[in-house]
Amino acid sequence: MSYVITIDGPAGAGKSSVAKAVARELGINYLDTGAIYRAIALILYESEVRAVDDYIMREALSKIKIELRGKEVLVNDFDVTGEIRTPMVDELASMYSAVPSVRKALLSLQKEQEKHGSIVAEGRDVGSVVFPEAMAKFFLTASPEARAKRRYTERIAKGKPADYGEILKAIIERDKNDSTREVSPLTIPEGAIFVDTSDMTEDEAVKFILCKVREKLPDETE
Ligand code: DC
């Protein structure tokens, strides 16, 4: 039986690490939809396609080929995996993902991933728009302060420069953009289980999700 699990939520709620761990535990694929938005945002920006001109935008989108190969994201056969995790791309992705033609262009690419077997899909609208029929849906969140603290710690651990105040400000701004945009705003999908990870470890969040998923997979042996 092939199935889909969705994990939506704001930036820094721990979705990526939790979704990856859940996929690993279940032995199924992990789909990072944010990486797709990041890749398209980077290429549109570098091609100087601005969000205001819908015709030019649609023309440009029709010429962009995005491919997912395991953890790698390829844009027109060019590997951008290493370039899409920067504060600048955080902002670009938030901005371009609010453009209706961008979301439309990326919808089928995301849906197609279901063909390769069961998946844990992570994003902002995977439970509401991309896979509304998913077997299990989760909405992972945490307070802006808890999320900023995690991002700060992550960056420091990677030896990257970090300023807690700046990170918190950027998180609040991104939350605002992602939840007030007209198309597919960040919302709690119907039927999703709400998980506040502010006071939870990653391991606890993973265990909680696995427990809920296994309730729906009665034949699975642990
Ligand atoms: O999860 P992330 O930070 O990598 O996502 C980057 C941006 O992409 C984020 O600002 C919101 C957007 N996004 C989206 O609009 N819909 C998704 N399904 C995934 C990400």
Image (cartoon, rainbow, N blue to C red):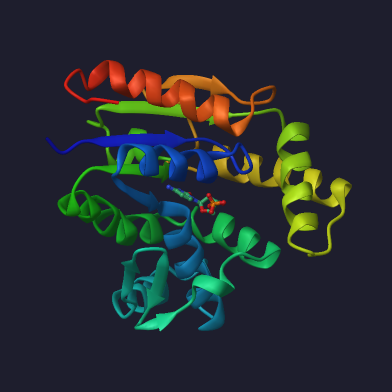
Q: Is residue 12 above or below residue 145?
A: below
Q: For residue 197, what is the image quadrant?
A: top right
Q: Is residue 24 left or right of residue 92?
A: left
Task: Give the total number of marks visible in the rendering.
Answer: 0
Would you identify the image quadrant in which residue 106 lies?
bottom left
Q: Position of residue 143 (x, y in %)?
A: 71, 28
Query: Which residue is at 40% across, 61% downward?
Result: 102
**Residue 11 in the figure: left or right of residue 68:** right
Residue 123 visible here:
no
69 sits to left or right of 57: left
Q: Is residue 2 above or below residue 36?
A: above
Image quadrant in which the C terminus is located: top left
Q: Do we see residue 154 in this rendering? A: yes
Tell me: residue 77, above or below residue 152: below
In this view of the protein, which residue sits in the foreground, 125 or 206?
206
Instruction: Point out the residue furthest to the left here.
Output: 1
Q: Residue furthest front?
A: 222
Q: Quadrant of residue 58?
A: bottom left
Q: Which residue corresponds to the image point at 36% horizontal and 35% vertical from the top-left?
A: 6
Q: Is residue 49 above or below residue 130?
A: below
Q: Residue at x 51, y 63 (%)?
A: 38
For the N terminus, the quadrant is top left
* Image coordinates for residue 130, horizontal then vertical, percent: 30, 43
Residue 210 placement (x, y as % from top left):
39, 26
The x, y position of residue 174, in whole percent, is 65, 46
Of residues 185 and 221, the one nearer the viewer is: 221
Residue displayed at 29% across by 75% down: 62
